[in-house]
Image: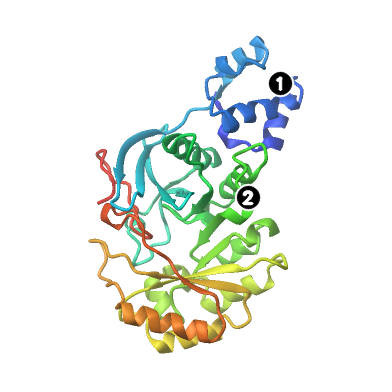
Amino acid sequence: MTALDLFDHDLPGLERVFERWGEKRFRARQVMNWLYKKGVTRFEEMTDLSAALRERLGREATAALPRIAAEQTSRDGTVKLLLELADGERVETVLMPDDGRVTQCVSTQVGCAMGCAFCRTGTLGLRRHLTAGEIVAQVVVGQARMGPDRRITNVVFMGMGEPLHNFDNVVRAFRILSSDHGLNITRRRLTVSTAGLADRIRRLPPEMLGSLAVSLNATTDEVRDRIMPVNRRFPIQELLEALRESPLPPRDRYTVEYVLLGGVNDSPDDARRLVKLLSHVRCKVNLIAYNPHGDSPFERPRPEAVEAFRKILLDKNFTATLRKSRGEDILAACGQLKAEEGGTLGG
């Protein structure tokens, strides 16, 4: 019998487990308090539970965390952890401290099936989905690594994998992370990235839509087909239609991410087409200067091209930010994650 992974359950799910066991529903809240508020994973230390319940948890459940197989620290303070899962598979997670805030980038799959031409993770192919518990456990490990004085304040589902390809597990992990009984990270500080799975966007619960970051990265289907194979299934107009028709809460906005590839999608004409494409989408734009790596032929855009692109958006009253790259020297920046075999971190 497979052991019950406590990290894999939100409060309602864990309450149902305890009801089946003949226990009171409030036991679920007690267990989640131990796991997420006190950081205790040893059942014998959960002293407000009965001895019989602790014994049963020891027999039938687990609260095991992935092992830190390797660690690298960047010049800018970014920390990249290579985590070994229970079956020996490995994923990377990145911790980014900055001005009293700590953002953690978590993985949702071992590898990725999307095959984006500029992304290092895509060269792995898809090995398997992560469970909700394996996604949540990355944050528990990250919090333990940062220590009690440096709280994880923001979580971005932007590590290895396409989050919406692993839809059910990502939705459940989102709810655990944002729950008062989980890690209690407000929804406005959670971001779920997607390469543009329009059918899954339409299925997202409304409370997650304001946390959605859509990687557009091109303004024509010809270019997007070439750099993002998902576009052949969900072309740009179909993707934008899914965004417009989804029930985005009134005060929320999508984030449209745009990786600027030198000489590919960073021209003034691209910027003007982007303005036109997004004119009826409630969104802000996050520009990302491409982070080079050895597995890709693309080049970083010229700084003046980046500024000219951004100015066109700003002049049309778009909120357009330029993401600051973190951890490039340890291959921890956007698009650079790739958990290598043999115990070494990507790179």
Closest to the observer, 169 or 318: 318
Identify whether 329 is placed above or below 292: above
- The residue shown at (36%, 62%) is 325
* Secondary structure under the numbered disc 2 in the rendered image: loop
Q: Nearer the viewer, residue 222 or 319?
A: 319
Q: Amino acid at mark 1?
A: Trp
Q: Is residue 142 above or below residue 126?
A: above
- Give the x, y percent position of residue 150: 47, 41
Residue at image position (60%, 26%) is: 34
Q: Which residue is mark 2?
A: 186
Q: Quadrant of residue 316?
A: bottom right
Say which residue label 1 marks: 21
Work out whether residue 220 can be spotted.
no
Q: Provide residue 184's location: percent of width, then percent of height.
A: 62, 42
Tag 1 secondary structure = loop
Residue pictured at 58% horizontal, 62% vertical: 212
Compared across the picture, whether 78 is left or right of 240 comes to left
Q: Where is the N terminus found, in terms of image quarters?
A: top right
Q: Can the viewer see residue 187?
A: yes
Quick check: 107 above or below 113? above
Label 1 Cα neighbours within 10 Å, binned few <14 / some 14-19 / many ≥20: few
Amino acid type, callout 2: Thr
Q: Nearer the viewer, residue 313 or 41?
A: 313
